[in-house]
C-alpha cells in the first residue's frame, strides 16, 4: 500500500515540475499527468478503507472554485470515498454550521475552502472543532491567516494541512505578462496619444492575500518592465480613486461586479472624451469576463479583426477565459491549476484513507519553507501565441 501511495507522490511531483513549461503546453502536460495521477489513485482505492468526507466550498458560484469542485469530485470518485459537497454561499456562519452538522453526523474528514480568507480567528475555530472531534481537516485555496501568520495555525493540530498557491506568484507572473505586452504594443495601446497607458484594476476581495498581491504586483512588476524600456509607467484611469482599484464589495470576485463597474466607467471614460481606459487588469478570470461583456456592448473586443481591442488580463485560466483568449477577446491569464490542486487534495485524502499521517510521503511536493504542512501548487502563464 505504501508503495502505491509513494508512486502517487512521484507522479504528482512530476506534474508540478512540468507545470512551468508555459502557455498551452501547461494544459496539455497537466492533463496528461492528471490522468496518470488518477490511474494511481484508482490503484490505491482498491485496497483502502471507506471514508466519509465533507467538502466545504466558500461559494459554488466562483468560476475557479467550480472547476476545482469538478476535478475533486472525479478524484474522490476514483478513491471510492463517500463525500458530500457544501456551498458556504460566502457566509462563514453558514459554513461553520455545515461543519458542525457534518461532524455530528460522523464525517471522517473535513476538506475546507474557508469563507473568511485570511482570518486567524475563523481558521483556528475550525481547526479547534476538528481537533475536539478527532477529525482530520484539510484546507485549500483560500489563505488561513495574514501572510506569515499561518504557521502557528497549521501547527496547532497534527491532522491538518493546507493546499494552495504561493500568493505573490500570480501577481508577479501577471505583472511580467502585462509589462512585456505593453512594451511590445505601446503605441497601439495609447489610444489618445498622450504617451501613457491608462489602466483599470478590478480586485476580488479586500483582505484576501491572493487579491492583495495580485493587485500590487501586477502593476508594480509591469511598471518596472515598462520603465526599463524607457516608457511611461501605467496610470490609473481615475485620478480621484486613491486606491487605484475597484473591488467586489461582496468579496465574490464576480463577473457581475466587474461588469457593473466597467459599464459605469465607460460612460465617463471613453474615446469620445479622449480618456479611454486602455488596459484592464483583473484579479481573476470571472471579473475579466464581466469586463469583456461591458466592452463588447460598447463595440470593443469583438474578436472580428476590425474592432478596437482593449487588452484584458486575468488569473485562473478557466475554460471560459481560454475560449475568450483564443477568440481574440481577452489577452492573457495566469493558470491556477484546478486539476493539480484537486489531485493533491486527493493524495492527502488517500493518506488519511490508508491510515497514514496527512503529510506522509510529500517530500517531493513544493512545500512552504517555513510551514511543514503547507503545499504550493504552482501557477503558469497562459496566452495564445
Image (spheres, grey):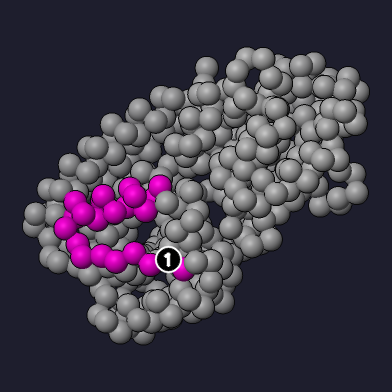
224 vs 347, left or right, is right
Question: Which residue is pictured at 53% across the width and 71% down the height?
Answer: 91
Above or below, 312 relative to 157: above
Among the 4 quarters of the image, the one containing residue 21: top left
Task: For label 1, count other residues whose C-alpha is less than 10 Å away and answer few (under 14), some (14-19) or many (20+).
Answer: some
User: Closer to the camera, 117 or 313?
Assistant: 313
Q: Where residue 27 sits: x, y (%)?
A: 39, 31
Provide the secondary structure element on which disc 1 rests.
strand
Location of residue 294 (image quadrant)? top right
The outermost residue toward the left is 47
Residue nearest the observer in this picture, 242 or 220: 242
Q: Which residue is found at the position 59% from the left and 65% from the top?
A: 118
Q: Position of residue 366 (x, y in %)?
A: 42, 46
Total residue callouts: 1
Residue drawn 22% across and 44% down?
A: 38
Residue 72 to residue 35: above or below: below
- Span colored in magenta: 67-88
Could you tell me which residue is drawn at 84 percent across and 37 percent down? 269
Residue named by callout 1: 87
Q: Is residue 143 visible?
A: yes
- Nearest to the observer: residue 243 or residue 166: 243
70 in the magenta segment: yes
Q: Give percent across and percent down for residue 207.
A: 66, 62
Q: Position of residue 315 (x, y in %)?
A: 56, 40
Q: Is residue 168 in sight in this rendering? A: no
* Quadrant of the rendered image containing residue 110: bottom left
Choose between 41 and 305: the one closer to the eye: 305
Left or right: residue 132 versus residue 283 is left
The quarter of the picture where the N terminus appears is bottom left
72 lies left or right of 194: left
The question of residue 255 being in magenta is answered with no
Amino acid at each position: 500500500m505504501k508503495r502505491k501511495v509513494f508512486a502517487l507522490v512521484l507522479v504528482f511531483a512530476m506534474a508540478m515540475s512540468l507545470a512551468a513549461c508555459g502557455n498551452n503546453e501547461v494544459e496539455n502536460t497537466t492533463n496528461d499527468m492528471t490522468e496518470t495521477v488518477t490511474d494511481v489513485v484508482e490503484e490505491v482505492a482498491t485496497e483502502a478503507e471507506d471514508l466519509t468526507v465533507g467538502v466545504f466550498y466558500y461559494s459554488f458560484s466562483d468560476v475557479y472554485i467550480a472547476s476545482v469542485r469538478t476535478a475533486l469530485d472525479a478524484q474522490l470518485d476514483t478513491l471510492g470515498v463517500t463525500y458530500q459537497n457544501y456551498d458556504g454561499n460566502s457566509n462563514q456562519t453558514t459554513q461553520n454550521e455545515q461543519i458542525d452538522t457534518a461532524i455530528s453526523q460522523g464525517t471522517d474528514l473535513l476538506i475546507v475552502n474557508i469563507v473568511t480568507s485570511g482570518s486567524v480567528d475563523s481558521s483556528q475555530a475550525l481547526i479547534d472543532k476538528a481537533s475536539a472531534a478527532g477529525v482530520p481537516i484539510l484546507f485549500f485555496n483560500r489563505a488561513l491567516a495574514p501572510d506569515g501568520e499561518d504557521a502557528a495555525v497549521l501547527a496547532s493540530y497534527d491532522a491538518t494541512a493546507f493546499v494552495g498557491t504561493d500568493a505573490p506568484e500570480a501577481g508577479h507572473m501577471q505583472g511580467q505578462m502585462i509589462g512585456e505586452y505593453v512594451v511590445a504594443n505601446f503605441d497601439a495601446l495609447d489610444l489618445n496619444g498622450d504617451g501613457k497607458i491608462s489602466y483599470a484594476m478590478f480586485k476580488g476581495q479586500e483582505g484576501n492575500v491572493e487579491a492583495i498581491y495580485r493587485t500590487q504586483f501586477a502593476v508594480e512588476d509591469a511598471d518596472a518592465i515598462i520603465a526599463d524600456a524607457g516608457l511611461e509607467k501605467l496610470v490609473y484611469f481615475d485620478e480621484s480613486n486613491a486606491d487605484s482599484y475597484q473591488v467586489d464589495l461582496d468579496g465574490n470576485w464576480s463577473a457581475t461586479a466587474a461588469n457593473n463597474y466597467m459599464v459605469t466607467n465607460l460612460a465617463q471614460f471613453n474615446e469620445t472624451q479622449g480618456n479611454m481606459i486602455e488596459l484592464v487588469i483583473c484579479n481573476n478570470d470571472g471579473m475579466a469576463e464581466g469586463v469583456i461583456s461591458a466592452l463588447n456592448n460598447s463595440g470593443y473586443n469583438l474578436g472580428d479583426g476590425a474592432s478596437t481591442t482593449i487588452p484584458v488580463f486575468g488569473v485562473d485560466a478557466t475554460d471560459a477565459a481560454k475560449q475568450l483568449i483564443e477568440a481574440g477577446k481577452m489577452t492573457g491569464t495566469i493558470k491556477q491549476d484546478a486539476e493539480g490542486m484537486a489531485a493533491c487534495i486527493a493524495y492527502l485524502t488517500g493518506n488519511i484513507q490508508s491510515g497514514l499521517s496527512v503529510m506522509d510521503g510529500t517530500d517531493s511536493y513544493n512545500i512552504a519553507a517555513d510551514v511543514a504542512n503547507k503545499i504550493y501548487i504552482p501557477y503558469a502563464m497562459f496566452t495564445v501565441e
